[in-house]
Amino acid sequence: MPTIHAAIIKTSEFIATPEIEAEPDTKTEIEAWLAGLRVNRLQTGWKNWLTTWSGNCSEFGRAHTEIILTADGKDVYALSELHPATISLRPSTDRYSVEVVQFNALAAQPIVLNPLLMLNAVHNVQGDDPNGTSLLWGMPFVAEIIVKITRNL
């Protein structure tokens, strides 16, 4: 599995960072802000965040990021990627949409995360399951094919 995990990380690193299109002064200002953005508690720059985000989406079938605001609530302070294993999608009271909740070892009940401060992505939703599908979903089948090809060489 380490080889597959490394492949997912490399794939995430190859995903291009979106290009900012704006007037030169505005573009410079936005790019500087994105380059200095605090991400994932220990990193800086939205490219680092994008690599983690796309890696989680590929590996787990979904990715969740919490937007952390400044103390005055007027600007983005940081982006914090939340590990998909701590996140659950719970049906909301309208029985159609879902609430994003986080399980915490210190809290008895899951914490409902503010949907206005969440960035959520799912990969390859199947049927009525909103959780998405990991790229690893088909691995047993692929592994069987690789073994058969290797034995026949």
Image: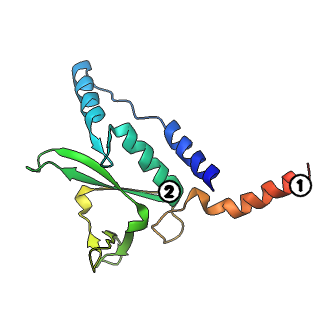
Q: Nearer the viewer, mark 1 or mark 2?
A: 1
Tell me the number on the disc at residue 123: 2
Reply above or below: 127 against 153: below
Q: Position of residue 50 (x, y in %)?
A: 40, 43
Reply above or below: 152 against 98: above
Circle 1 — which element? helix
Q: Position of residue 87 (x, y in %)?
A: 38, 67
The N terminus sits in image quarter: bottom right
For badge 1, the amino acid type reads Arg
Q: Looking at the image, is mark 1 or mark 2 earlier in the sequence? A: 2
In the image, taking residue 141 as reference, residue 136 lies left or right, namely: left
For badge 2, the amino acid type reads His
In the image, taking residue 57 as reference, residue 37 lies left or right, namely: left
Residue identifier under label 1? 151
Circle 2 — which element? loop
Q: Position of residue 85 (x, y in %)?
A: 43, 66
Q: Residue furthest top?
A: 24
CA separation in Å, label 1 and label 2:
33 Å
Q: Residue at position x 50%, y 59% from top?
A: 61
Tell me the number on the disc at residue 100: none
Badge 1: residue crowd in 10 Å (few <14, some 14–19, many ≥20): few
Asked which quadrant contains residue 66, the reply is bottom left
Reply above or below: 120 against 25: below
Out of 115 and 148, give the one closest to the viewer: 148
Q: Residue at position x 29%, y 29% from top?
A: 31
Out of 17 and 4, give the one closest to the viewer: 4
Q: Residue at position x 38%, y 30% from top?
A: 19
